[in-house]
Image: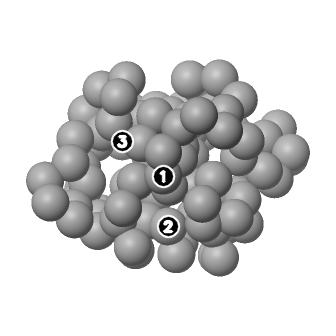
Amino acid sequence: MNGQHVLLILAHLFRARGAVVTIDDAVEYLSFRCRYGPPTEIRKMLAVAEQRGMIEREEDQIHAGFLFDRQSLSPNMTHLLNNAVRVRDNVEPMQ
């Protein structure tokens, strides 16, 4: 998974759920509704996105660090991502 894939997933999240999302809502939406991966992998992806400055965190809420409404979303985005988020094991999940 590269940075562009993470941006596409985050753009999809923020467009669907609004500019500010709780971590639990983000995990529930991306894992159970969109089926991008298990909750632990989604939490790891959010932690990586925070480290890379793609999102900003305030307590239990996250908001985009990029113009998510300008990101181009492919209609077959889930197919391109193979329906799974895979993050290295050494990343701690966002709590």
Tell me what residue is drawn at x 53 percent, y 37 percent.
91
Residue 27 marker: 2
Q: Nearer the viewer, mark 1 or mark 3?
A: 1
Q: Is residue 39 left or right of residue 22?
A: right
Determine whether the residue tagged by mark 1 lies in a helix, strand or loop. loop
Question: Which numbered disc, 3 or 2, marks the residue that appears first in the sequence?
Answer: 2
Q: Nearer the viewer, residue 21 or 92?
A: 92
* Label 3 crowd bin: few (<14), some (14–19), many (20+), radius 10 Å: few
Q: Quadrant of the C terminus?
A: bottom left
Residues under numbered marks 1 and 3 in contact, where contact means CB atoms less than 8 Å apart: no
* Label 1 crowd bin: few (<14), some (14–19), many (20+), radius 10 Å: some
Question: Which numbered disc, 2 or 1, marks the residue that appears first in the sequence?
Answer: 2
Q: Kindly give the residue lying farthest to the front in the view shown.
A: 90
Amino acid carrying mark 3 in the image = Asp
Determine whether the residue tagged by mark 2 lies in a helix, strand or loop. helix
Residues under numbered marks 3 and 2 in contact, where contact means CB atoms less than 8 Å apart: no
Amino acid carrying mark 1 in the image = Pro
